[in-house]
Amino acid sequence: MSIEQIPDRRQRRHARKRADLIAAAWDLAREVGLAGMSQRALADKVDLAQPSLYSYFSSKNDLYDALFADAYETLLARLDTWQLPAEPRDGLKEACRQVMAFFLEDPVRYQLLFQRTLPGFEPSAGSYELAVRYYEWHRANLERAGVHGQVYMDIFVALQSGLAGPQLSNEPGGDRWARHLDWVIDMFLREVDRRQQDDARDDEPAQGRSRL
């Protein structure tokens, strides 16, 4: 439900103020880092008494959770706007390019969503459900491309993050690692095809195989 659809005026004001605070928290995190952010610093940034901030975020982890949910909501909204090619493997590669662009446009957001750098923080069940929706979107793209099985999903996730991580760490704003994305996905798909063909041959009845 959007803020405008909230029937109660007081609740709408609260939701708008909370959205403004989340936006300010992102700006603060980009200035001082996620670990360096505090509720006091956020209250100072928006000229709000710290006790008033507790009516929006009960703790620092609650604030992190709001940012986590906000970031995934942004990503899921993007998914709906992407026009992917109809050919499944072309669609998979374009999905990967779009996701990589999302990763690289905001290192702090990437850190919160995909790296466990905040001791003691775990997303709430509601926020984590957003992450699951994104994960299942990627799984569906893989399955349309003929890639089935959890082991392949795990490797696929590792390949994408394996390019995004060093890109953000070593050359933010560049493409030294990110430019290899298509090549890496092609190698992945070729290896999947090879292994699946081997598995299919292993499942053939022995009398149906050549002895050569």
Image (cartoon, rainbow, N blue to C red):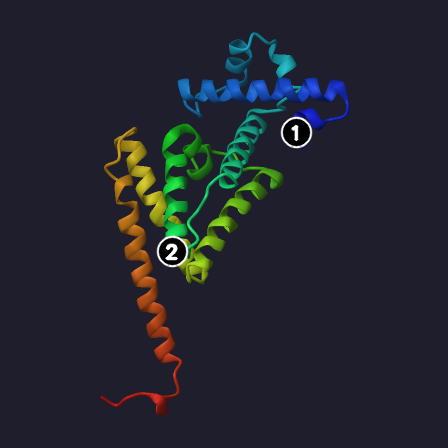
- Observer-nearest residue: 152 or 95? 95
Q: Give percent across and percent down for residue 29.
A: 45, 22
How many residues crowd mark 1 within 10 Å: few (<14), some (14–19), many (20+)? Answer: few
Q: Give percent across and percent down for residue 108.
A: 41, 28
> As shown in the figure, which amino acid type bears the numbered disc 2?
Arg
Q: Name the residue located 77 percent from the left edge and 22 percent from the top edge.
A: 8
The residue lying furthest to the top in this view is 47
Q: Is mark 2 in CB contact (under 8 Å) with mark 1?
A: no
Task: Please indicate whether residue 75 sits to the left or right of residue 157 in the image.
Answer: right
**Quadrant of the drawing holding the N terminus:** top right
Res 2 label: 1
**Quadrant of the drawing holding the C terminus:** bottom left
The residue lying furthest to the right in this view is 8
Q: Name the residue located 32 percent from the left edge and 33 percent from the top edge.
A: 168
Task: Please indicate whether residue 174 sits to the left or right of residue 124 in the image.
Answer: left
Q: Secondary structure at mark 2?
A: helix
- Observer-nearest residue: 95 or 160? 95
> As shown in the figure, which amino acid type bears the numbered disc 1?
Ser
Res 89 label: 2
Q: Give percent across and percent down for residue 117.
A: 42, 34
Q: Give percent across and percent down for residue 206.
A: 36, 89
